[in-house]
Image: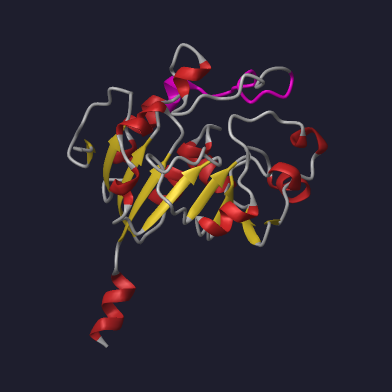
Amino acid sequence: MYIYIYIMNKKKSICIIGKGPSVLLGNSSMYNDFDEIALINWPIIDDKYIPKRCDSMFTHYFGDQEIDENRKKMLVTSKPWSNDDIIKYNVKNIYCCVPNDDNYIKKFIPNNYYNIKIHKHLRHIIDIMKFDNDSGLLALTYYCEQPDVEKIFFIGFDTYTGKTSKDNYYFTPPDKITGQYSTINNDCHDRELSIDYIQNIGKKYPNIHFNYISKINFKEYDNFKKYKI
């Protein structure tokens, strides 16, 4: 009976790994003890920096399984994983971060990525944020809203403030990411809003303890602190 109560009340620690250059300040072994690891938009696999585990993937992109023909043409910084990688990294959940209304998402987003159901209905998370933004901030807000989460660590959230595209990722994006369907040329991230949102996330969710590694010089406070490597 007591064991059952303990399990029901157990609080979780979450790690969210973005694709910014601050990922290179960490290493793959530092993520072993988290209850859940979330990755953003199919990162480039690098055993030195990325853990061999992905419980949840938050993404805008679904590769060849896209329904919308224009979305199939998108040139992205890193390709969606293969089914072999999905199995290798033991992906359990995939969350759709497409910033659009529910009707569009229902019509144009596939129900599954290989054999994993895609969680589509996250529009309420964007509504909480009050601005459309990247998958990383959506993942951060999603976990803040979960009642069983008490610790969140995030890395690679550098808000794309580098001078060139190569400065904005822990890997070198392909040179061919140009043109009408380029995810770089069609970048709609609001840096100022993003930085302000992250800076104040601990005040919005005072019940959660946040640690981070970022190229952004955030100001620390009681429940929002830089991770000490």
The residue at 43%/20% (across/down) is: 192
Does 11 sit above or below residue 97?
A: below
In the image, taking residue 39 as reference, residue 185 lies left or right, namely: right
- The chosen color scheme is secondary structure
Q: Residue 68: x and y, percent?
A: 79, 40
- Point out residue 73 in the picture as x, y percentages from the top left corner: 76, 31
**In front: 46, or 212?**
46
Q: Please say whether residue 183 is one of the residues in the magenta stretch.
A: yes
Q: Residue furthest bottom?
A: 1
Q: Where's the C terminus, which quadrant?
A: top left
Q: Residue 207 location, x and y as percent?
A: 26, 51
Q: At which x and y percent is residue 172?
A: 51, 24
**Which residue is rendered at x = 53% and y = 61% of the image?**
92
- Displayed quadrant of residue 80: top right
Q: What count of labels does the image hold?
A: 0
Is residue 58 found left or right of 158 in the rendered image? right
Image quadrant containing the N terminus: bottom left
Q: Nearer the viewer, residue 23 or 126?
A: 23
Extreme-front residue of the structure: 47
What is the magenta segment's predominant secondary structure?
Answer: loop
Q: Is residue 111 left or right of residue 161?
A: right
Residue 17 vertical position relative to residue 3 in the rendered view, above or below:
above
Quadrant of res 194:
top left
Furthest toward the right, the residue is: 69
Residue at 33 percent across and 74 percent down: it is: 8
- Magenta residues (range): 180-194
Compared with residue 36, is residue 210 higher up or lower down, i.e. above or below?
above
Answer whether residue 191 is magenta in the image. yes
